[in-house]
Image: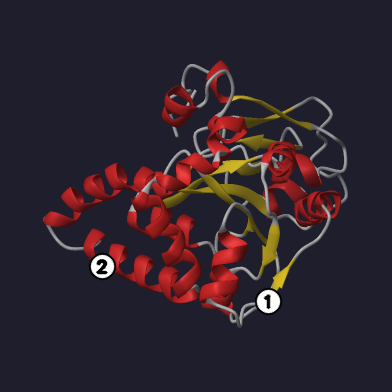
Amino acid sequence: MCEFCASHGGKTRWYLNPENYSETLLEDKKRMKILYNISGYGIDYYLERTTRLGKLANLPVVGGVFRKIANWMSPGMHSGQVVTTEEAIKVLELADNVCILECMCRRLVHAEKKAVCINFGPIKELFEMLKPSERIEVRPIDEVQELVRECASQGLYHEVLWAKIPYPVVICNCQVEYCCAAKLRFLYNIQKSLVKGHFVSSVTKKCDGCEGESSPICVEKCPFKAMTYNAEEKRAIVNQQLCFGCGVCKNLCPKDAIALIPRESIPAIKHLW
């Protein structure tokens, strides 16, 4: 299991542990400061944090030291972990005060207004108080879960974000090119800004390489470039070292030829988070 589940999961994963949604966790002043920053600064919070951390991580000589410090600090900040569609839906069963906001990362990178950022806990009240101009949408929980499924069908992956571990506050439906957490990991090697999920993909014998197509859909849509195509065997191949266990390949596979298996079951990658 990942380090967060070992510390905060109880008998399950940290984001599926009902205790981690308790309002008593809001008595933590540092956590509340993070929540106020997320809600009050909105897009400026993400811009400032990504720019500042990126510049420091790229400094010659001391950049490596800073990256270690940033990784150490990330659990106490606003970072996250990849989850499957099924796990995201379970998180929403545990969450209170669920609302939908436009994705700040998309707005920052692409000036695109897309309401796929699902928030809970005190976020709704804080946005209403600190950022009243933001569009906030409230729907019945089954409709919000259906939004997650719709995002999955579009090839988006899901991540659960914490406001100081282990308090979950967001299910975001993401693409790597927009996601600030992903940028911190892939551009600046701050790995704990976006932690790998608890599963990895495994291609089964059903795979025929999407016969008749130019390339398998899993290869085209994998957010983390973990899928390749073996032309001789006419099948997709997954590099489990690169796989984040998001399940995009499984969700989109027309042959139901991809399974998700626990990361912990594979000795070579069980410690790769």
Residue located 62% across and 63% down the image: 124
Image coordinates for residue 200, horizontal then vertical, percent? 61, 31
Q: In which quarter of the view is residue 16 placed? A: top right
Q: In this view, does 267 lie to the left or right of 93?
A: left
Q: In which quarter of the view is residue 199 placed? A: top right
For marks 2 and 1, give the CA distance: 32 Å
Image coordinates for residue 266, horizontal then vertical, percent? 54, 18
Image coordinates for residue 45, horizontal then vertical, percent? 42, 70
Tally the numbered discs: 2
Asked whether the residues under the numbered discs 2 and 1 touch, taking CB atoms below 8 Å apart as contact, a structural biologist would say no
User: Between 54 and 25, which is closer to the camera in this rendering?
Assistant: 25
Q: Is residue 244 visible?
A: no
Quadrant location of the C terminus in the rendered image: top left
Q: For mark 1, does the 10 Å Cα neighbourhood hold few (<14), some (14 to 19), or many (20 or more) residues?
A: few
Depicted 161 relative to depicted 236: above or below: below
- The numbered dot on residue 55 is 2
- Amino acid type of disc 1? Arg
Depicted 190 relative to depicted 234: above or below: below
Q: In this view, does 236 lie to the left or right of 72?
A: right
- Amino acid type of disc 2? Lys
- The numbered dot on residue 135 is 1
Secondary element at tag 2: helix
Depicted 80 relative to depicted 235: above or below: below
Residue located 76% across and 37% down the image: 234
Secondary element at tag 1: loop
